[in-house]
Image: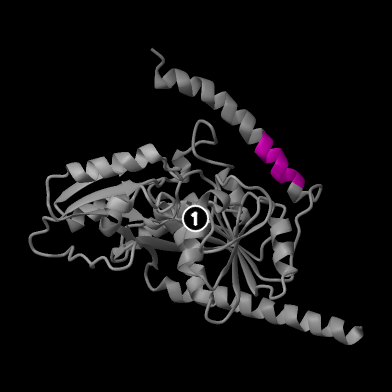
Amino acid sequence: MISWGMVKLFLIPMSWIYGWVVFIRNLLYDMKFFHSEEFEIPVISVGNITVGGTGKTPHTEYLIKLLKSNFRVSVLSRGYRRKSKGFRLVETTSDVMETGDEPLQIKRKFPGAVVSVCENRAIGINTLLNMENPPDVVVLDDAFQHRRINPGINIVLIDYNKPLKEDRLLPAGRLRESRYQLRRANIIIITKCPPEIKPITRRIMAKDVFLFPYQELFVTTMTYGSVYPVFPGAPLPDLFSDTRNRGILLVAGVASPEPVIQHVKKLSSEVETLIFPDHHNYTAEDIQGIIGKYEAMNTHDKIIVTTEKDIAKLVRFDELIEPIKPALYCLPVLVRFLDQEGKLFDKKIREYVGENKSNRELHFRKNRNKS
């Protein structure tokens, strides 16, 4: 039988090779042998240096909420695990297999935002700028490693529960690139933190990420909103009743399911789970398994709770999920900055977008006057 130690002995040399390839690629960009394109439009990148969930989508949604009242906001993603290629605009009625689950989730939550997918973000931004009504700001989802673009603000997210100093490069660990590359970030956010962080813990976190004077460090925690019915007409459940005997089947395909599980267990004493891999593409067999487990639950009063990311793929099976539509509820994930830091973060983002939007408009006016 092969032990984990033997596997690590095989993976660590592969990590060294991977690390050298990534190092040389970054060096060629740093030395300008590879070109990074800059745009007159404000561009904000939200990314990470690890594989797995750090909360990119909730933080992207936070930016949309922050900016949508004053600016035309666009979100550009590669559309992870989509079956299509090239640039595509995401509509609320789009097929999740053509767009990816998270872009479709964002579009359905913020129908006024321009959401698009393109594996080449430079092509994607240029396409957006050539639209009849171009956006004022582009938010790039998961683009820290996409160095063809030099964004105005580079935001990197790090999971509090998975310190970088204890990690290794792929494939022996979760790191996409060395911790040293955090120097390219303008803002570093430690996500999924406990509700309170001591000053000494903050200093340790700043040291662990090699924080430079030109960088700012923020900390956020993940909170959950109230569950809501996926299909209109279903009643809002009283999940905080004294008896707490409502049965809940939690269905989730996320990178870090444990926080969601723990939260749902606070809502009911009768919780069962069906956990799938991150970005799982549900099948008809999966749907039948969900229905079977739901029907087998002994409690008469029961519901199914899932995430907003999973809903986009579950509702594709409209006829199959017909028996459980009244029982299907969604749990939204929200971001909260700690220690009132949200005001400082909000101010920085608004000022960057406002100033660069004004500069772009002034540039266009000068060009029109010359012509």
* Pointer 1 residue: 102
Query: From what the image shows, is residue 324 above or below residue 172?
Result: below
The quarter holding residue 355 reads: bottom right
Is 27 covered by the magenta stretch? Answer: yes
The kind of secondary structure the magenta stretch mainly shows is helix
Q: Residue at x 63, y 80 (%)?
A: 354
Question: For residue 343, which quarter of the picture?
Answer: bottom left
The amino acid sitting under disc 1 is Glu
* Stretch in magenta: 21-28
Residue 224 falls within the magenta-colored stretch: no
In this view, which residue lies farthest toward the right? 371
Q: Residue furthest left?
A: 243
Kindly state the secondary structure of the residue where label 1 is placed.
helix
Residue at figure coordinates x 49%, y 35% from the top left: 173
In the rendered view of the protein, which quadrant contains the C terminus?
bottom right
| Picture layout, residue 35 above or below residue 354 | above
Instruction: Name the foreground residue: 333 vs 8.
Output: 333
98 left or right of 287? right
Image coordinates for residue 198, horizontal then vertical, percent: 33, 61
Residue 327, percent across and down?
Answer: 25, 56
